[in-house]
Image: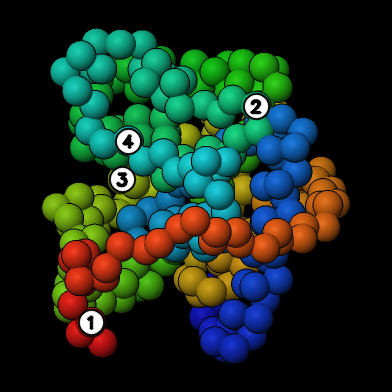
Amino acid sequence: MDNNHKKLKRDIYFRELEKLQLDLVKMHEWVKSTGYRLVVVFEGRDAAGKGGVIKRITQRLNPRICRVVALGVPTEREKTQWYFQRYIPHLPAAGEIVLFDRSWYNRAGIERVMDYCTEDEYWDFLRSCPRFEEMIIHSGISLVKYWFSVSDEEQEKRFIERINDPLKRWKFSEMDLASRTNWVDYSKAKDEMFIYTDTKVAPWYVVNADDKRRARLNCIHHLLSLIPYKEIKHKKIKLPPVNKEGYIRPPMSEQTFVPEMY
């Protein structure tokens, strides 16, 4: 992104975000109504803004329809499974949207750079991944992949903000330190990953993420443009009157209320 590009103003950002979130609601209602299945993969460097856009996508949606999957470190048992096996149970059923906050691409990124996998495991992943994603798509699931690109200067700024802000300190980890130390290695790993997995069937979409607000809006707008949704017409709802006949509320003194501190 052009460093001279001014950051998006707050009022413009929230106005546009509200419009996009309204369309997201329409889209997820269409998904439920039609039985559409959607998987969205969010990858990128640490502090690139993946979590921020996921939060804005899910903010107004029904969590029973749109859910986030963010798997932790694999268990000893999972380490002995076929690599893709632990991701398969999280794929959507009819009428569901699944957002992967990091995904099977851990193997091509952190596992590759930090030597958490062997050379054979790594190259087997690069060969197998395109076929795995083709299987997902051929089963009728729509797959969208986003890579959030952030400059080293902006990443450093965000890391410092995390360290100094008590509300964000929990976001900073030892892996964040490693991502700075191994910046070039992560860049090479990403480039190699794209060579093998940026396919016509399942392409990578790169999001310029130095400006968080623009990145969120651009990503959501693009995602909506890929889904062939239509607005679902709802029946008019008329609330019936409440029938309180025969009901006597117990004395309020017999209930334990939360202290009203505010």
Q: How far is mark 3 from mark 1, CA to CA?
A: 54 Å
Q: Which of marks 4 and 1 precedes in the sequence?
A: 4
Q: Nearer the viewer, residue 203 or 50?
A: 50
Q: How far is mark 4 from mark 3, CA to CA?
A: 23 Å
Q: Which of marks 3 and 2 precedes in the sequence?
A: 2
The percent position of residue 18, horizontal first and vertical second, equals 64, 73
- Amino acid type at circle 2 is Ala
Q: Would you name the residue on which mark 1 appears?
A: 260
- Crowding at label 2, few (<14), some or many (≥20) Cα neighbours within 10 Å? some
Disc ID at residue 123? none
Q: Would you name the residue on which mark 3 appears?
A: 185
- Amino acid type at circle 1 is Glu
Q: Nearer the viewer, residue 9 or 251?
A: 251
The percent position of residue 118, horizontal first and vertical second, equals 25, 20
Report the residue at 45% width, 58% height from top: 247
Report the residue at 41% width, 39% height from top: 69
Q: State whether residue 144 is above or below residue 241.
A: above
Q: Which of marks 2 and 4 precedes in the sequence?
A: 4
Q: Would you name the residue on which mark 2 appears?
A: 94
Query: Do the numbered discs 4 and 3 sit on residues whose CB atoms are within 8 Å?
Result: no
Q: Nearer the viewer, mark 2 or mark 3?
A: 2
Q: How far is mark 4 from mark 2, CA to CA?
A: 22 Å
- Crowding at label 1, few (<14), some or many (≥20) Cα neighbours within 10 Å? few
Report the residue at 21% width, 37% height from top: 114
The percent position of residue 120, horizontal first and vertical second, equals 32, 14
Query: Do the numbered discs 3 and 1 sit on residues whose CB atoms are within 8 Å?
Result: no
Give SS at disc 1.
loop
- Crowding at label 4, few (<14), some or many (≥20) Cα neighbours within 10 Å? some
- Amino acid type at circle 4 is Leu
The percent position of residue 98, horizontal first and vertical second, equals 53, 38
Q: Nearer the viewer, mark 4 or mark 3?
A: 4
- Amino acid type at circle 3 is Asp
